[in-house]
Amino acid sequence: MHFEKTILILILPLLLIIHSGCPKGVTGEEALCIVNRSGNEMSFWHSENYPTSHFPDTVLPVVVPIRDGYASPIRGAGKGGCVGSNVGQRPLWDEVFSDLPAGLFTVYFFDTRPTTQAEWDVLRNDTSKVHRKDVTYEFLKNNSFTITYP
């Protein structure tokens, strides 16, 4: 009996630390998955400012979305496998779609991965290099939160 109490006393603080470090509202099941089936390297981006750069306002922002000195929000889409994004987990999809102006979530696909403002400007000025998918919440649910390109 004394042994069990000692273990509980030692483990309980650890469990509290682990639990308090877990992000709130994470479902773990509804993270966005991007699958690139084009056979070419692609990159993708979606605005985290949900009222902007989503349908019907599908203009790319003037400033390249760079965080911490690199284009972290712009992700490589690989070839064939699932590349994830934590959208849908933080914030949850209900919150995301409540902010979308037309109820469509927009993902942009690029043939290159822009890492500088100059590369971003090329994409903004040549729309043939930007491909877009607009999806509904129902589409995401019915497709296991997976968007494929093309």
Image (cartoon, rainbow, N blue to C red):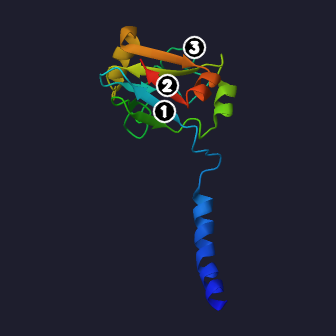
Tell me if residue 64 can be seen. no
Q: Secondary structure at mark 2?
A: strand
Q: CA distance from mark 2 to mark 3?
A: 20 Å
Q: CA distance from mark 2 to mark 1?
A: 6 Å
Left or right of 78? Residue 8 is right
* Residue at the (37%, 16%) spot, across then down: 123
Q: Amino acid at mark 3?
A: Asp
Q: Earlier in the sequence, mark 2 or mark 3?
A: 3
Q: Is residue 73 above or below residue 148?
A: below
In this view of the protein, which residue sits in the foreground, 140 or 18?
140
CB atoms of marks 2 and 1 within 8 Å: yes
Q: Quadrant of the N terminus?
A: bottom right
What crowding class fits label 1: few (fewer than 14 Cα within 10 Å), some (14-19), or many (20 or more)? many
Q: Earlier in the sequence, mark 2 or mark 1?
A: 1
Q: Secondary structure at mark 3?
A: loop
Quarter of the image for residue 27 reads top right
* Residue at the (34%, 24%) spot, across then down: 42
Tell me if residue 103 can be seen. yes
Disc 2 designates what residue? Answer: 147
Disc 3 designates what residue? Answer: 57
Q: Amino acid at mark 1?
A: Cys
Q: Amino acid at mark 2?
A: Ile
Q: Earlier in the sequence, mark 1 or mark 3?
A: 1
Across and down, in percent, residue 137 comes to 63, 25
Disc 1 designates what residue? Answer: 33
In this view of the protein, which residue sits in the foreground, 86 or 60?
86
Q: CA distance from mark 1 to mark 3?
A: 23 Å
Q: Nearer the viewer, mark 2 or mark 3?
A: 2
Image disc number at residue 2: none
